[in-house]
Amino acid sequence: MSDIFVMALVATLGTWSMTALGAATVVFFRTPNAKMLNLMLGFAAGVMVAASFWSLLQPAIERAEAMGGIPAFLVATGGFLWGAVFMWMSDKIVTCARSRADNALGEKSERLNRIIMLVLSITLHNIPEGLAVGVAFGTLGNENVSMENLMGAVTVAVGIGLQNFPEGAAVSIPLRREGYSRKKSFLLGQASGMVEPVAGVVGALLVVYMEAVLPFALSFAAGAMILVAVHELIPECQRNQEKEPYSSTMGIILGFTVMMFLDVMLG
C-alpha cells in the first residue's frame, strides 16, 4: 500500500519539476516566443479536456455504477460541479483579496500586489491538479494493478505536467518584466508548484482509505481541470490570434488527440 503513496509523491514531484522547468525559461530569454507559447498553452488545454473525461469522468461513472447506492449520474454530476465550484471560489478569493489590497495600499503597492496575486492564483490552481494526480494513483490501491491502470494514472500526471510548463513560465516571465532578477523570478515561479506533491499525497490517502468517495473524487478533479482549461488556458492561448490564428487551435486539437490516443490505447 505504501507503494501507492510513493508513486503519487514521485508523480507530483514530476509535475512540480515541469513547473520549475517552465519557470527556468526566464533564465534564457526575457520574453517567450508568442507562437510557441500559444501552441503549448493550447496543447495543455487539449490534454486536460481529454484527460478529464477518459481518465477521470469515465472511470468515476463506471465505479459509481459498480458500487451501487447513489445513482452514478448524480455522483458524477455532483463531483464535477463541486470541482468547478472549488476553482471558481478560489478565483473569487484571489479577486477579493486583490481588491482589498488595492484599496488599503494604494497605487504605490500595485506592482507588489500584482505579483503576489499572480503567484497566489497559480498556486491555488495547482492544488486540484495535485489532487487529480493523487486520486489517479490512489485508485491503484483499490484494485489489482495492471499496466493499463498504471498507465492511465501516468497519463493524468503527464497531462498535468505538460500544462504546468507554461504555468511556470507564466509566473517567472512577468516577474522578470517587473524588474526581479532571473534567480528570484525562477525561485518564485517554481515555488507556485510546491503544493502539488502535498495535494497529491492527500488525494491518494483519501482514495485509499475512503474508497466510497473515489467516484466523487475523480469527478471533482475533472470539474477542476475543465474549469482551469476553459477559463484560464484557452482564453490565454487565443491572444495575438491575428498573427497566428491557428497555432493555439491546432495545439488544442493536438493535445486532445494525444491524450485521447493514449487513454483509449491503454484501456
Image: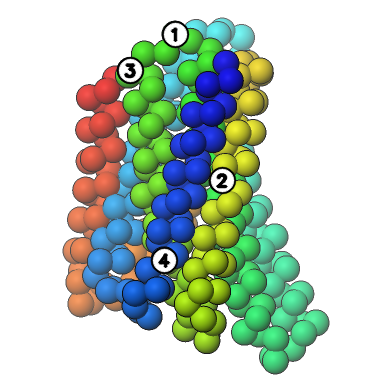
- Distance between the alpha carbons at the discs numbered 1 and 3: 10 Å
Do labels 2 and 1 touch, CB within 8 Å?
no
Q: Residue at x 40, y 36 (%)?
A: 156
Q: Residue at x 26, y 61 (%)?
A: 39
**Label 2: which secondary element:** helix
The location of residue 141, given as percent across then percent down, is: 53, 16
Residue under label 1: 144
Question: Which badge, 3 or 4, comes first in the chain's sequence?
Answer: 4
- Distance between the alpha carbons at the discs numbered 3 and 4: 33 Å
Q: Residue at x 43, y 21 (%)?
A: 59
Which corner quadrant holds the N terminus? top right
Going by the numbered disc 3, the residue's amino acid type is Met
Q: Is residue 136 visible?
A: yes
Viewer-side residue, 256 vs 149: 149
Which corner quadrant holds the C terminus? top left
Relative placement, left or right, of 131 versus 228 is right
Going by the numbered disc 4, the residue's amino acid type is Ala
The location of residue 235, given as percent across then percent down, is: 39, 63
**Label 1: which secondary element:** loop
Going by the numbered disc 2, the residue's amino acid type is Glu
Viewer-side residue, 147 vs 49: 147
Question: Which badge, 2 or 4, comes first in the chain's sequence?
Answer: 4
Viewer-side residue, 116 vs 48: 116
Q: Tag 4: Cα neighbours inside 10 Å, few (<14), some, or many (≥20)?
A: many
Classify 33 as above or below 168: below
Residue under label 4: 24
Residue under label 3: 147
Q: Which mark is residue 196?
A: 2
Relative placement, left or right, of 266 versus 120 is left
